Image (cartoon, coloured by chain):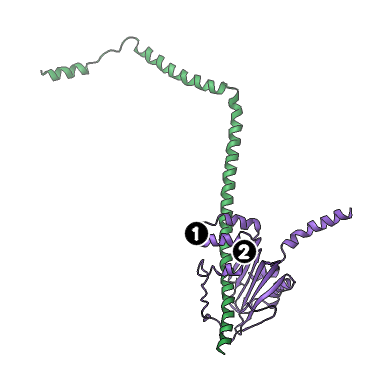
Chain colours: A green, B purple
């Protein structure tokens, strides 16, 4: 038998855990649970925590309303800008057309 | 008591005085027969809002921004029809009648045999121009533009070649329309 096989057999041999192994695992699990519980108790135990909920909700509401209003204003502004550009385009082209008609008449008179 | 009533009456009439030209209601009915309609109503607050969204970096938009900075309102009604005779003279007369006041002067009136009639009215506000109305009545198209506030028509026509406005070649007249056009020198002068 080679030394490698010896080492392998030794490694795979069943070993009994130390006598208080299970108790130590359970104790550690309980400790972690209690840390979480203490944290939650601290947070929920504060007098200001329940009061914070409506304040946060109000802040969210005001922020949301402001954002919506700004978005609405931007949409209205863009629409107004488009309307204005259309109006200027129509006004400009109609004035140009009138000017052209007048020039045509003047040109005709000069030729006569 | 009497002066209080007078003040109340003045306060009630002030908005009417501010908006001296009203787009007739019967114009809106024309939209039913029109193939294309443009309806623009921009009062002072809407113009200010629109102006804020015009870019200073874009040369065309910067020109428009400068142009509208002092305006009180811009109103456009434009209708395009697929056949002749869809609007009556009374539709246009409703606007014309409002312009027969000492404040307004018709500076251009062009009538062509093809039925393409154009009129330009300017409002005098002391030494400045206080407004502009353009009425273009063609067989298949009716356009009314009312610009309320100090405006220079030259500034507006300078936009030619930009923003889709055709550029006018001032050295020669255009080819469109009939050569038998005749202008009407109804008021002060022709141009």
Q: Which residue is mark 2?
A: B40
Residue picked out by circle 1: B58
Task: Using the rendered view, name the quadrant where residue B98 is placed.
Answer: bottom right
Looking at the image, tell me whether mark 1 or mark 2 is earlier in sequence order.
Answer: 2
Q: Position of residue B191 (x, y in %)?
A: 63, 77
Q: Which residue reaches farthest left?
A: A1
Instruction: State the count of labels.
Output: 2
Q: Residue at x 59, y 31 (%)?
A: A53
Mark 1: few/some/many CA within 10 Å (<14, 14-19, 20+): few
Query: In the rendered structure, the residue with mark 1 lies on which chain?
Result: B
**Disc 1, disc 2: CB below 8 Å?**
no
User: In front: mark 1 or mark 2?
Assistant: 1
Q: Chain of mark 2?
A: B
Q: Secondary structure at mark 1?
A: loop
Graded by Cα atoms within 10 Å as few (under 14), some (14 to 19) or many (20 or more), the crowding at tag 2 reads: some
Direction right: furthest residue: B1
Q: Position of residue B188 (x, y in %)?
A: 69, 78
Instruction: Determine the secondary structure under disc 2.
Output: strand
Q: Residue at x 60, y 32 (%)?
A: A55
Q: CA distance from mark 1 to mark 2?
A: 23 Å
B170 lies left or right of B135:
left
User: Which residue occupies the foreground of this view, A106 or B143?
Assistant: A106
- Asked if marks 1 and 2 fall on the same chain, the answer is yes
In the foreground, B126 or B76: B126
């Amino acid at each position: 038998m080679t030394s490698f096989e010896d080492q392998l057999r030794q490694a795979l041999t069943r070993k009994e855990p130390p006598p208080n192994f299970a108790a130590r695992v359970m104790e550690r699990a309980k400790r972690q649970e209690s840390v979480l519980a203490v944290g939650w108790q601290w947070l929920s135990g504060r007098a200001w925590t329940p009061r914070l909920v409506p304040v946060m909700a109000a802040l969210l509401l005001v922020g949301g309303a402001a954002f919506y209003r700004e978005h609405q204003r931007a949409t209205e502004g863009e629409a107004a800008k488009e309307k204005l550009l259309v109006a200027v385009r129509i006004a400009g082209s109609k004035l140009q057309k009138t000017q052209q008609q007048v020039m045509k008449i003047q040109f005709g008179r000069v030729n006569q | 008591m009497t002066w209080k009533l007078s003040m109340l009456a003045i306060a009630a009439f002030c908005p009417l005085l501010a908006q001296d030209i009203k787009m007739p209601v019967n114009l809106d009915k024309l939209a039913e027969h029109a193939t294309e309609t443009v309806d623009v109503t921009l009062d002072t607050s809407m113009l200010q809002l629109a102006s804020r969204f015009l870019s200073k970096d874009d040369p065309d938009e910067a020109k428009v921004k400068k142009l509208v900075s002092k305006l009180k309102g811009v109103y456009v009604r434009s209708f395009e029809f697929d056949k002749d005779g869809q609007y009556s003279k009374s539709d246009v007369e409703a606007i014309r009648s409002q312009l027969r006041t000492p404040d307004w002067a018709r500076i251009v009136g062009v009538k062509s045999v093809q039925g393409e009639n154009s009129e330009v009215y300017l409002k005098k506000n002391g030494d400045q121009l206080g407004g502009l109305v353009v009425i273009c009545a063609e067989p298949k198209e009716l356009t009314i533009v009312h610009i309320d506030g100090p405006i220079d028509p030259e500034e507006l026509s300078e936009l030619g070649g930009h923003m889709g406005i055709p550029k006018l070649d001032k050295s020669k007249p255009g080819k469109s329309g009939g050569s038998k056009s005749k202008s009407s020198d109804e008021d002060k002068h022709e141009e």
